Each structure stands twice: as structure tokens, then as C-alpha cells.
Amino acid sequence: MQIDIRTLVFIIGITHIIQFIVFYIQFKVVRVYKGPGWWLLWSAVEVLGFFVILLRDIPAIFPLVIIIQNTAIISGTIFLYIGVMRFLNKKENLKLIISVSSIYLFGLHYFLFIHNSIQIRSIIINAMLAFVAFLTAISLFRYKFNSVRNAANFNAVVFVIHGLIFLYRTFMFISGVRVEDTLSPTLFNVIIFLDALLVGLLWTFGFVIMINQRLNSEMTEAKNHFELIFSTSPEGAVITRMEDGLIVDVNNGFTMLTGYSREESVNKTIFETNIWKNIDDRNSVISALKKNGYCYNYEAIFIRKDRSELTGLMSAKLIKLNDVQHIISITRDITELKESEEKIKKLNEELEKRVTERTLEINKKSSELSDNQIALMNIVEDLNEKSELLKQNARLLEASNKELEAFSYSVSHDLRAPLRSIDGFSLALMEDYYKDLDENAKNFIHRIRNATMRMDNLIDSMLKLSRVTRYELRTEKVNLSGMVFEIAERLKTSQPDRNAEFNIQENVFALVDPYLLGIVMDNLLNNAWKYSSRKERTVIEFKTVMKDSKVIYCVKDNGSGFNMKYYNKLFGAFQRLHSSKDYPGTGIGLATSQRIIRRHGGEIWAESIENTETTFYFTLY
């Protein structure tokens, strides 16, 4: 049976159109991967190359057809190689590709227009195709991931077979086999078109499997990561079905918090375990979830298995499991904290009552006791008693503050777990259902991910503030001028094209903690740099002045300044006087600086003229 080459070429062109559609779909779904876009280009240029072959019989455009046909097919194989390298997160060898491609193009044009030889052209083209095929096969064997090992090996073998076919043709042409017209139905010609048809289908099949294997591996890894976070969280975590409160999963923190084992909890409803003291609290959480999709720091009373009560601080988020609405919640036990707060409240009330009573008593009897030494001693004794009570109250307040500080620090750490879950699920939605989402849904997901990033920055700032409070001072003589100079150099290096001038007073020394003062200077200079960024020329000055025999340190800039009527907000934690769109930041730097300066026995303040200048002053000891 004789095969019609033109029909075969047409079929190959149609299959490449189908492959183009397949890779276009893959490219849209997994846009995060770099390879599929290059494979899409391969299928596009292959369609062009094989349909141009059908125009070879037109003498007037024959040289142009030869150039377009062969260059398109060669370019397609190069695109395959680049796509493989990019998919495997490697950089393609451009020097090698450009060098070999230049030799190919020179040879093709020389033996087409200057010394027309179809024999040598055939050797060059077949050798080039074999070279790129072997290069791609080696890359797949060498750089493949474990997650795509099988599909990569399959594709590599197909590339090797493809390369061997063209290597065989190269040697046959070198040995003197006469070149037939490409469209003549000889076995020697039919082989390359059958190769193009079968190999193209196998490549498409293999590359799609590679993509799916990588996606499955990453989804499994993300799932395992989430399960690890869920199971190892020290707080009580539980997943329940929203419709009926059925408990789907709990972690060890939940069993330790409530006393219920996993077997006693899973596949039972919240109502069967009866852990809510007041079911209206759960209804409030459900209402917040239905309205906002989340609920943060809801305080409620829960019942343990032994019927004892605990005060919990709950945060919850709506998630979908198998297209069914579920709730994932994390609860922290704050019972001891609430008890401490109640004790402090009672002590304060008792102290206030006793002080009031004693004050009235003193006022009433002050005239009677003027000459009575014994009565005076009784008053002194009463005052001593009050003093002791005040000391006791101060100790309780100090203990409570430390506990609150530890609680804040722990919450800052534990907030990251649900935050990562939110970000992870959002990323999973983007990767798995991107093509099914409308633009509003995609916008919502992007906004969720941006919000988690902003929340993560706020948590980092909270941790920094907590560390500054707990850090033990280690004072030594520090060259503040040198410290400011280093920060200034770093700022200028970050924006080398910016017109900026730093005026730094030399030989300014102070007895301070170098780490903490480094934070202060970094905050003040970074603020000066940031808020003067819109000036044509930035001028920042560091100097000292003497007032009442005390050294005052100054950082001045010619930036945007602020309205002094908002001064009372300046050193508050997470307070900002400018829009975050204009000047990004978390609003924690000045609050941190104030705590550090006060720990050094000093004060910090500022003076500003809006749109003109700002000067920060601080003292030490």
C-alpha cells in the first residue's frame, strides 16, 4: 500500500493543532510553571512548518518554503528543549543553542542560495534535529525531579528514539544515499513523517503526565504540611461540619484542652459532646462566619469532659471539604489569665475602698491627733499597712503584665498557623480551580493572599516589640556617628540614583546597648529616608545639642512632615499618620524606639512642620 505524503502531512498539521489546544489549556491552568508556554510555542511553529511543506511544488516561492519549513521545525524542537529546562527549574544552555543554530542557519542559506545542494542541506537539517533531540533527552535524564521521574524517563526515551532516526538519516545521506523529493512516497520519506506524527503525540502525552505528576506531588506536600501544622499545634484545633456540627477531626491540643479523646470526639456532633456552656456563643460564631467567612478572638466558656469550665479565645474560618462547608477553629485556654485579671480587679477595688476610708478617717481626726503621739503612731502603722498592700498590688500587676506579655508573644507565634492555612488554601484554589473562577473570585483570592502577607508583617512587628521589652540591657561605649554612617551608606546603596545628602556629626559617643540603639537609629533614619523620598533633594542630619547640661540627640529630615495636632498618636503601636499607599509600613517602629529610649532612662519627642521638615530628639540617662 502506498501512503500519500500530502495526506500524512495534513494529518500531522491537524494533530499539532490539537496539541496546541492541549498545551494552551495546560498553560492557562498551570501558569505558575514555566515549561508549558514553550511547549505551546513548539506546537504552534510545528503547525506552520508542516503546512508550509504543502507549498513546496510552487517554484516561485520554493526557497522561501525551504527556509520557513525547516526553521519552523528546528525552532520547535529548540522550544521543546527550553520548555523542558524551564519546567525542571534549570537554565538552558543558550551559548550552545545559539552557536549550533548559527552554524545551521549559515549552512542552510549557503547551500540553498550560493551553492545549491539538497544533499548537504539534508545532512545539516537531520544532524541539527538529532542534536537537539539528544540534548533534550540528556536534560530529562539528568535534571528530572523524583516526582516526575517516570514521565521524564518516558519522554527521554522518546527523544532518544527520535534522535536516532535523524542520526540514521544523517549517516545515510553522508554515505551517498540520494535525496528524494520530500513529498515522494518512499519508505525513507514516510519514516520521518510517521516519526513526526507518533513522536508528537507521545511528547504531548508525556508532558501532560509530567505536569500532572508535579501538581499531584505539590498538592500532597501541601496537604502533609497542613496536616502537620494542624496536628502539632499546641492550641485546641477542630474541624466541624457547619450544617450539623459534626466533628471531622481534632488535634492533640483539643484532647488536652477538653479531656475528650479523639475516639470520643470524631464523628460526633458538638451537641453530643456538649462542650459549649452557652449554645448562643456558638450561634454568634456561626453568624460571624456566615457574614464574614471568619471569626477572630471570640471569648466563650467551654465545658471539659470532667464538667469543669474553661475560658477560651477562639478564632475560626470557613473552609470547603468535598464541596461541603466546614469550620476550622483554634481555641486558646485563657482561664488563668482571666482569673489573674479578676484578682487584680478585686485588689484594686479593695485598695481604693480602704484608701478612701482611711482618708476620711484621717481628715476627721487630724485635728484631734495633733498632740497625741500614740494616735500618730497608729496612723503611721495604717500607712505602712497601705504601703504593703500597694506593694502587693504592684507585684500582682507586674506578674500579670509578664503573663500578658508572654501571652502576646505566644499568640503572635500561634497566629501564623491559621495564617499559613489561609494562604495555603488560597494558593491551592488558584492552582486547582483557577480556570473555573470568575474575575471577582480571582480578585478575592488575590486580596486574601495580600491580606495574609500584611498580617504576617504585623505579627513580625509584634514579635519585635515583644523582644525589645524582654531584652536584657548590656551597655557599652558606642560610636553613634559610625552607626549612623553605616545606615546612611546602606540607604544610599539601596537607591543609588537618588539625590541625597547626609550631614553626620563626628565623634558622637554614648554608653548604651549597641543592639537596641541600633534599632532606634535604624528606625529614625529609615523614616527620614522614606518620608523625604518625594523631595527633589533629600537632606538628613544627625547631630547633638546641649540643653541644661544634658546631651540631646537629633535626627532631622526635609521630608513630608506631619500635622502636630496628631502628635499624641505618633508613638502609639500600629499608629500611622500617613496612608500606607503613600508610605508603606506597620506603624510599630516609633513605638519600639520609645520603649528602647525609656529603658535607657531617656525620653524621645518630635517637632514637625507639615510638608517642610521633621526633627526627632531623644535623651539617654
Image (cartoon, rainbow, N blue to C red):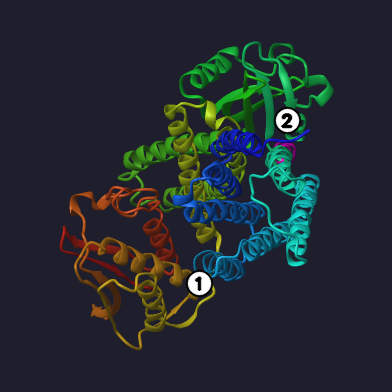
Point out the image quarter for the C terminus.
Answer: bottom left
Q: Which residue is drawn at 52% across and 34% down?
A: 346
> The disc labelled 2 sits on which kind of residue?
Phe
State the residue in front, 325 or 283: 325
Location of residue 188 with respect to 603 vertically, above or below: above
Q: Main secondary structure of the magenta part?
A: helix
Q: Residue at x 42, y 59 (%)?
A: 592
Q: Which of marks 1 and 2 is nearer the N terminus?
A: 2
Instruction: Work out whether residue 210 can be spotted.
Output: no
Asked if residue 96 lies in the magenta stretch, the reply is no
Please provide percent x and percent y for residue 7. Answer: 63, 34
Provide the residue designation for mark 2. Answer: 254
- The local secondary structure at tag 2 comes to helix
Dot 2: within a 10 Å radius of its alpha carbon, few (fewer than 14), some, or many (20 or more) residues?
A: many
The span shown in magenta is: 227-232
Provide the residue designation for mark 1. Answer: 515
Please provide percent x and percent y for residue 297. Answer: 53, 32
Q: Residue at x 38, y 38 (%)?
A: 361
Asked if residue 228 lies in the magenta stretch, the reply is yes
State the residue in front, 310 or 20: 20
Please provide percent x and percent y for residue 98. Answer: 56, 68
